[in-house]
Every structure is written in structure tokens, then in C-alpha cells.
Amino acid sequence: MTLAHAYTAASATDPLVPGTIRRREVGPRDVLIEIAWAGVCHSDIHTARGEWGPVSYPIVVGHEIAGTVLEVGAEVSSHRIGDRVGVGVMVDSCRDCAHCREGYEQYCLNGMVGTYDGIDRDGSPTQGGYSTHIVVDEHFVLRLPEGIPFEKAAPLLCAGITTYSPLRHWNVGPGSRVAVVGMGGLGHLAVKLAHAMGAEVTVLSHSMRKQEDGLRFGAVAYRSTEDPATFQELAGSFDLIVNTVSAPLDTDAYLGLLTLHGTLVIVGLPPEPASVSLGQLLGNRRSFAGSNVGGIAETQEMLDFCAEHGIAPEVEIIPAAAINEAWERVIASDVRYRFVIDASTFTP
Ligand code: NAP
Ligand code: ZN
Ligand code: ZN
């Protein structure tokens, strides 16, 4: 049993405060990780504040974890003490159902176990990465390639794979016209990844404040969604639109931007339901789709792709004590472009 320092939320309205949690004994196939960096995902906020439904408190969120292996179980074969590793949104799944066998653990037919607010093997709630240590089955532990700076690796474990997976699934490549809606943590990586895959990328943002950055990340155009001309001029323009926005949007307006056989894929997950005019789907035979993170093999592929193409998130490093203020800045779209917590500061 390892006692870990962590930042916990006692309720949907309480700020995060320092505390301690117990990590399970290292089982034969488990890896004990000393966390070095913990990324801040907007999902942490939705979850801790109960926006997606009830959760069990106290909760430790965080599912963008980069750290070093401290201990391995007797049967562990893929990781060694001292390795730089990562953990994302899942820490377990049945690994036996048709989806798991195909590498889609995130869609496990028996339910994947989330890194936080899941149900651990001993029946207790799983606790996430705003913490000094974590114990995870080796299958859900990723290798961090040397080419990715350690402090920049963490956000790839959620924001990176969540945007990489739909780009791959919808076969983005040279000649693809891709729009990324919302340029926050997920969105800025979507721009870099789609550009590296050869697509022509447009950012659709609710302000022009980040235009220079968007063009630097590889976009060819940056347009404001507050300007009605954007929707008129770009009608029928895109093969794929990736919506990363954490707030409700006018789905019909974005469907109108799709070309023949185009797809609007939702990765941003505001709690409110969306409405779609069915006629918008018939025109141009459009698709309205969703995508949830990515499987373990695909996450490793994404990490290797990022190392090969020199892709990393833009990060702002903060100490644990700054986390409540950082959350407010995320909500205000005032993050450039991912907060990463120095995990050594979880220890008082
Ligand atoms: P984030 O850093 O806060 O980025 C969200 C972006 O959405 C903002 O930067 C902003 O971009 C835009 N936005 C925010 N509020 C808006 C508003 N009221 N109107 C219009 N645009 C607004 O969040 P994130 O960490 O990237 O996460 C984004 C969403 O994805 C969250 O809902 C999160 O829960 C979800 N998520 C889903 C998955 C999955 O597997 N599907 C995985 C991770 C996260 P602009 O300023 O450029 O407009
Ligand atoms: Zn996330
Ligand atoms: Zn399964």
C-alpha cells in the first residue's frame, strides 16, 4: 500500500484541497508510478463539479499522467523500473470482449474503468492523477518516447489521443479539409495533428484572440464563429469538422459547413443535449458522430507519431496550489494551451 499526496474535491462546489489517498498493493501485473506531471483536462472540471452526473466524493481527478516507474509486479514484462511512462483516461477493461480484443478498450462491452470515478478491483472508486503516485495494470501504461519532453507528454494522454483517434478514423490525410472548432487543450493539438497528417486545417474559434497561434500550429485559416459571414463563406467546405468545445453550440450551423459525405464529429462534451435538424443530415449525405479517447495500442501509436513529427502541446506549468485558479482560467478559455501540474508540489 502506498500513501500518496493528492488534491481532492469534497463536493461539487468545494475547491480542491491537499490530502492523502491510499494506492493499492502492487499486484503481479501492476506498475507503481511516481507521477511527475499531471495535465488539466476540462473533463476534470465537468466531473468534479458533477456536471455530467453524480460522482463519489472525495474525488481526485486528473487523467493526463506522466511519470517514472518505481516498482513493478512479478509478471510485468512491458515496463521496467526507471522507465518514463504515461497513463490516460482508462486504467482497466475486461480485455476479453470483442471490442477490447480489437484494441477498442475505451468501448469495452463490459465497461472500461476510468482513471477517476471508476470502480477499482477492490470496489473502491478510482482516484486520478492530481497525485504523487498511482498503481496501474501494465496494459494501461504507455511508453513515453524519448523525443517528447517529459512535461509536455502528459496532455497527449487525453487531449492528444482524443483528437488523433477521430482524425485517423475518418482517414484524414493530404487533400483533407478539416475544421477544428475551439482551440483549447484538445483543439490546439487537433490543429497540430491534422496538419502533420497533411490536411488543410481551418480553426473556428469564438474569438480572433488566438489567430497568430493557430496559424503557427499549422492552420491555413482562422475564423471567428461570432461572425455570421464565417458560416456563409465556408458553407459546404469541410470533409471533417472536429468539435472540441466544452459548451453547447448550434449543431445545424456547423453541419452546414460540411461538403458531400462530410462528418461533424463531437469530442467536446458539454452536459446539455444537442439538437439537430434532420434535414441538415440529408443534404450532402452528412454524418453527425462522436468519438471517445482512443484504445491503448492507438495511444501508443499517437505518442510515437508525435515523437516522429515533433508534435507536443503548448503547456503552462503550475504548482498544485494554483489549481483552483487554473480551472477558472480554463473555463474562461484563458489557457495557452494546457495547464500541467508539477506533481512534486502535491507533497506539502
Ligand atoms: P478547453 O481547453 O477548455 O477548450 C475548450 C475550447 O472551447 C476553448 O478553448 C474555447 O475555444 C471553446 N469554448 C469554450 N467555451 C466556449 C463558449 N461558451 N462558446 C464557444 N466556444 C467556447 O477544454 P478541453 O480540455 O480541450 O476539453 C474540451 C471538451 O472536450 C470538454 O467538454 C471535455 O470534457 C471534452 N473531452 C472529451 C474527450 C473525449 O474523449 N471525447 C476527451 C477529453 C475532453 P476558442 O476560444 O478557440 O473558441
Ligand atoms: Zn481528458
Ligand atoms: Zn472489454
Image (spheres, rainbow, N blue to C red):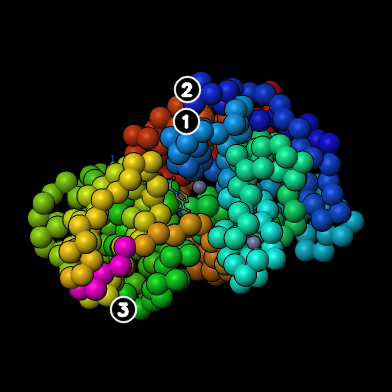
Residue 232 lies in the magenta-colored region: no
Q: Is residue 264 left or right of residue 226?
A: right
Q: Earlier in the sequence, mark 3 or mark 2?
A: 2
Specify the quadrant of the image occupied by residue 262. bottom left
* Percent x, y of residue 198: 38, 74
Pointers 1 and 2 in contact (CB under 8 A)? yes
* Secondary structure at numbered mark 1: loop
Identify the residue shown where x is 27% and y is 75%: 261
- Name of the residue lying farthest toward the right: 74
Q: How many marks?
A: 3
Residue at the disc numbered 3: 175
Type of residue at label 3? Gly
Disc number at residue 193? none
Q: Earlier in the sequence, mark 1 or mark 2?
A: 2
Residue at the disc numbered 2: 13
* Percent x, y of residue 6: 66, 30
